[in-house]
């Protein structure tokens, strides 16, 4: 996995605006029952914070993994306690990847896609260890 390509994709997405509404729209399209969990998040701040935490965790995970992997394992349990089935939790990371690919268009190339696929496989491995 090329950590530089993952980092660069985050930078390019940030230049294009806030991906939060698009990531969650994709997540809710795949799992409509998850939208009800955000009924009190009327301004999207909770969703934005969750996406920022996920990005922060990924940046650590692709570097030295001092906390990123543990954060994901902890959050899968926390989210189960909130009503998010274990199998739905990784869908969020796929929604991130697919949204970023769409936002970046031509700037999302085969190498970036391969880096994200490797990242998602590594995340799946970390989550299955929990």
Image (spheres, helix red, strand yellow):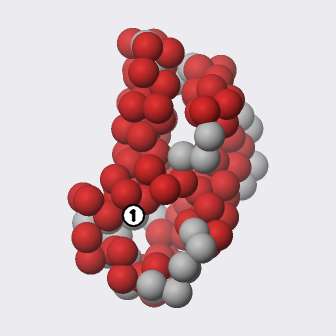
Q: Position of residue 109 (x, y in %)?
A: 43, 13
Q: Position of residue 113 (x, y in %)?
A: 41, 22
Q: Is residue 111 left or right of residue 10?
A: left
The residue closer to the viewer here, 124 or 50, is: 50
Residue 33, compared with residue 63, is above or below; it is below
The residue closer to the viewer here, 4 or 18, is: 18
Residue 90, compared with residue 45, is above or below; it is above
Q: Residues within 10 Å of mark 1 (few under 14, many from 20)?
A: some
Residue 57 is at least partly visible in this image: no
Residue 19, compared with residue 84, is above or below; it is above
The tally of labels here is 1
Residue 102 is at least partly visible in this image: yes
Q: Position of residue 61 (x, y in %)?
A: 64, 43
At 43% from the left edge and 59% from the top edge, which residue is drawn?
Answer: 24
Residue 116, compared with residue 78, is above or below; it is above
At 36% from the left edge and 75% from the top edge, which residue is drawn?
Answer: 35
Q: Position of residue 2 (x, y in %)?
A: 57, 20
Task: Identify the secondary structure beneath mark 1.
Answer: loop
Name the residue beneath numbered marker 1.
89
Q: Is residue 39 left or right of residue 2?
A: left
The residue closer to the viewer here, 115 or 10, is: 10
Q: What is the quadrant of residue 4 in the picture? A: top right
At 42% from the left edge and 21% from the top edge, which residue is drawn?
Answer: 105
At 47% from the left edge and 69% from the top edge, which residue is drawn?
Answer: 76
């Amino acid at each position: 996995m090329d950590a530089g390509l993952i980092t660069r994709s985050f930078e390019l997405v940030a230049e294009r605006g806030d991906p939060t509404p698009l990531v969650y729209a994709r997540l809710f399209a795949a799992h409509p029952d998850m939208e009800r969990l955000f009924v009190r998040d009327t301004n999207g701040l909770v969703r934005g914070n969750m996406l920022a935490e996920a990005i922060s965790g990924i940046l650590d995970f692709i570097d030295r993994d001092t906390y990123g992997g543990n954060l994901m394992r902890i959050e899968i349990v926390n989210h189960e306690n909130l009503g998010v089935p274990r199998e739905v939790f990784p869908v969020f990371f796929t929604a991130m990847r697919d949204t970023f690919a769409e936002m970046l268009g031509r700037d999302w190339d085969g190498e970036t896609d391969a880096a994200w696929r490797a990242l998602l496989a590594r995340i799946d491995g970390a989550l299955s260890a929990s």
